[in-house]
Image (cartoon, rainbow, N blue to C red):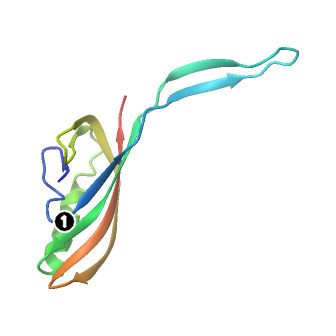
């Protein structure tokens, strides 16, 4: 299970991380009467990381308590994000947490969610 800031916020249900690549911020300059273009590099952009999953609980209140814990982690500070295969992504900020509705999942309760992170350069 993914861990953010050494907290096991997502341990009650399955989660999947999608780690995006790096890209180069740039400006393309076109000049009249010249062939081609010139490119000015402006450094790397941050890496986008998306997490989707489900929070599970024995009742709606326990699922809601998990939601509140995750929302408390939206502090604007960079932390470590550990994925489920042992990689550590450093200097990561949680940008958004988008919870779905609480619903029945067999004998338990569940809430789907989506989290967006940005790994700073």
Residue 81 placement (x, y as % from top left): 22, 42
Q: Quadrant of residue 6?
A: top left
Residue pictured at 18% horizontal, 71% vertical: 56
Of the pair 21 and 25, the residue shown nearer to us: 21
Identify whether 116 is placed above or below 109.
above
Q: Quadrant of residue 119?
A: top left
Of the pair 35 and 55, the residue shown nearer to us: 35
In the picture, which quadrant includes the N terminus?
bottom left
Q: Is residue 82 left or right of residue 38?
A: left
Q: How many marks?
A: 1
Of the pair 82 and 86, the residue shown nearer to us: 86
Residue furthest to the right in view is: 33
Q: Is residue 59 left or right of residue 99?
A: left
Identify whether 83 is placed above or below 60.
above
Dot 1 surroundings within 10 Å: few (below 14), some, or many (20 or more)?
some
Identify whether 37 is placed above or below 69.
above
Residue pictured at 37% horizontal, 41% vertical: 118
Residue pictured at 14% horizontal, 85% vertical: 107
Residue pictured at 61% horizontal, 18% vertical: 40
Residue 5 placement (x, y as % from top left): 17, 44
* Secondary structure state at the residue bearing disc 1: loop
In the picture, which quadrant includes the C terminus?
top left
Residue 20 placement (x, y as % from top left): 40, 41
Q: Which residue lies under the disc numbered 1? A: 13
Residue 37 placement (x, y as % from top left): 73, 19
């Amino acid at each position: 299970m993914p861990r953010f800031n050494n907290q096991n916020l997502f341990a009650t249900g399955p989660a999947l991380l999608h780690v995006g690549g790096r890209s180069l911020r740039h400006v393309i300059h076109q000049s009249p009467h010249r062939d081609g273009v010139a490119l000015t590099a402006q450094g790397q952009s941050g890496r986008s990381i998306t997490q989707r999953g489900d929070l599970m609980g024995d009742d709606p209140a326990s699922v809601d308590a998990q939601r509140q814990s995750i929302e408390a982690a939206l502090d604007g500070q960079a932390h470590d994000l550990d994925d489920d295969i042992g990689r550590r992504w450093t200097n990561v900020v949680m940008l958004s947490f988008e919870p779905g509705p609480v619903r029945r999942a067999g004998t338990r309760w569940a809430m789907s969610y989506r989290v967006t992170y940005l790994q700073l350069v």
